[in-house]
Image (cartoon, grey):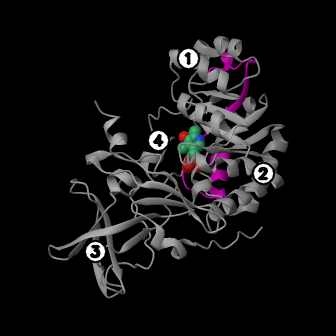
């Protein structure tokens, strides 16, 4: 399958956008969902949306047409999945709390425990509340090619998943239907192949006894150059070899390149170079820019000094390190100019904060018919209500 060329239509409505605003382009989201649906159809795998990475629920009517449900990391994500997406709800948490477990069990089709301790503690109650629930355990294959330690669930002393050494054979009883691993981050089908090899080497005898294996997230399926056919053949081979159903739960791949964060220049100052201050913040509105760290692409801009006018772009928080990066432009920037920060739909508004009393960017949808719909605006009350 050749992935469609993604074409942003943001330019056509740029004037209408009040900044700051995350603008999800429905047509681009649909293209990602179609790519994922193709993987499902050819491989037989089921694909869930990981709410951790993308939870713009006003789009879930569309998501529901293509994917099998959502994976949640706890009670609130499970509730949102049930209320807004429907279909299957799979819940995994590093540790479930006693006062939430019954509600989580009643909302979930699959529940994945992070330890045998939690499994033992909760398996009876979970089955009592929801006799149809399918129980799994997360394993740690102790192999990952994750690009940064912050995103490596298989780093030394990781709390995520059970290692083979800690795997309690005697407790791997008939109540366990599946195994779950999550070891990838923005990775290729080649990386999956390597992780699967580690998974099989360590856990093959248990896989054989499972109904399903969940390959977690981190599959960069919708990225240009991802080898989709290889993914499909890996899934087909694995499910045939072990007689199991395969699940994938991507977050990033769903929201990947589906729209920008649009900002405005609010001041331009000098301190050894020109510095433009925007009405968005790296710290508050696109935290992975500082955490990963990475340099976002900006429409019409290039590396510093590639084009005639170079600026450092900074956020409007008081954090000294709230810097987006240095960029060059063909024309000088002016106060009021719009800056289009590309690919800001996944892992942005799910993580943003009102740090420093900054306004949260609006959430908007550029609909397939070309109209702009602002689905949520945030105000002072949103800031005040989470403080006291
Ligand atoms: C983060 C996470 C995902 C989604 O990962 P992406 O990189 O967004 O695809 C899926 N499953 C689990 C358990 C996760 O922690």
Residue 41 highlighted magenta (yes or no): no
> Which circle's residue, 2 or 3, is located before the other in the chain?
2
- Cα gap from disc 1 to disc 4, whole angstroms: 21 Å
* Disc 3: which residue: 335
- Quadrant position of residue 125: top right
Q: Residue 307: x, y in percent?
A: 35, 86
> Which circle's residue, 1 or 4, is located before the other in the chain?
1
> Which circle's residue, 4 or 2, is located before the other in the chain?
2
| Vertical placement of residue 128 versus 252, above or below | above
Q: Badge 1: how crowded within 10 Å, few (<14), some, or many (20+)?
A: few
**Quarter that holds the N terminus:** bottom right
Q: Residue 137: x, y in percent?
A: 64, 28
Give left or right: position of 219 versus 279. Answer: right
* Disc 2: which residue: 40
Q: Are marks 2 and 3 in contact (CB under 8 Å)?
A: no
**Quarter that holds the C terminus:** top left
Q: Secondary structure at mark 2?
A: helix
If the picture is divided into quarters, which one holds ligand 1?
Answer: top right
- Quadrant position of residue 84: top right
What segment is highlighted magenta in the picture? Answer: 168-197
> Which circle's residue, 1 or 3, is located before the other in the chain?
1
- Cα gap from disc 2 to disc 3, whole angstroms: 47 Å
- Cα gap from disc 2 to disc 1, whole angstroms: 34 Å
Q: Badge 2: how crowded within 10 Å, few (<14), some, or many (20+)?
A: many
Q: Nearer the viewer, mark 4 or mark 2?
A: 2
* Disc 1: which residue: 117
Q: Secondary structure at mark 3?
A: loop
Label 2 CB-ligand 1 distance < 8 A: no
Q: Badge 4: how crowded within 10 Å, few (<14), some, or many (20+)?
A: some
**Residue drawn at (69%, 20%), measured in percent from left and top?**
172
* Disc 4: which residue: 155
């Amino acid at each position: 399958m050749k992935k469609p060329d993604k074409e942003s239509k943001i330019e056509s409505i740029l004037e209408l956008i009040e900044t700051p605003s995350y603008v999800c382009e429905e047509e681009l989201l649909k293209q990602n969902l179609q790519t994922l649906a193709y993987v499902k159809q050819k491989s037989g795998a089921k694909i869930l949306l990981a709410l951790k990475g993308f939870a713009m629920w006003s789009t879930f009517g569309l998501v529901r047409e293509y994917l099998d449900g959502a994976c949640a990391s706890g009670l609130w994500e499970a509730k949102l999945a049930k209320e807004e997406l429907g279909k299957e709800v799979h819940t995994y948490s590093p540790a479930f709390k006693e006062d939430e477990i019954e509600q989580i069990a009643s909302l979930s089709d699959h529940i994945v425990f992070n330890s045998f301790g939690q499994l033992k503690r909760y398996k009876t109650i979970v089955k009592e509340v929801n006799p149809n629930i399918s129980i799994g355990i997360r394993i740690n294959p102790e192999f990952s090619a994750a690009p940064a330690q912050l995103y490596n669930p298989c780093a030394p002393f990781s709390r995520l998943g059970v290692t083979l050494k800690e795997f309690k054979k005697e407790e791997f009883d008939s109540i366990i239907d599946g195994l779950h691993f999550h070891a990838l981050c923005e990775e290729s089908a080649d990386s999956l192949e390597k992780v699967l090899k580690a998974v099989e080497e360590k856990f093959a005898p248990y896989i054989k006894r499972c109904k399903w294996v969940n390959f977690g997230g981190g599959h960069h399926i919708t990225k240009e150059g991802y080898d989709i056919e290889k993914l499909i053949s890996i899934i087909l081979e694995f499910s045939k070899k072990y007689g199991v159903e395969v699940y994938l739960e991507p977050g990033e791949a769903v929201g990947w390149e589906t729209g920008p964060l649009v900002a405005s220049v609010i001041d331009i100052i000098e301190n050894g170079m020109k510095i433009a201050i925007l009405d968005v913040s790296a710290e508050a509105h696109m935290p992975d820019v500082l955490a990963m760290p990475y340099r976002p692409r900006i429409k019409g801009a290039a590396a510093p000094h590639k084009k005639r006018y170079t600026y450092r772009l900074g956020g409007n928080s008081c954090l000294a390190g709230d810097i987006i990066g240095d960029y060059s432009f063909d024309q000088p920037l002016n106060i009021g100019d719009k800056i289009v920060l590309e690919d800001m739909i996944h892992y942005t508004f799910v993580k943003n904060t009102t740090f420093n009393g900054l306004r949260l960017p609006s959430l908007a949808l550029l609909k397939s018919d070309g109209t702009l719909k602002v689905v949520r605006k945030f105000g002072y009350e949103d800031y005040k209500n989470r403080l006291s």
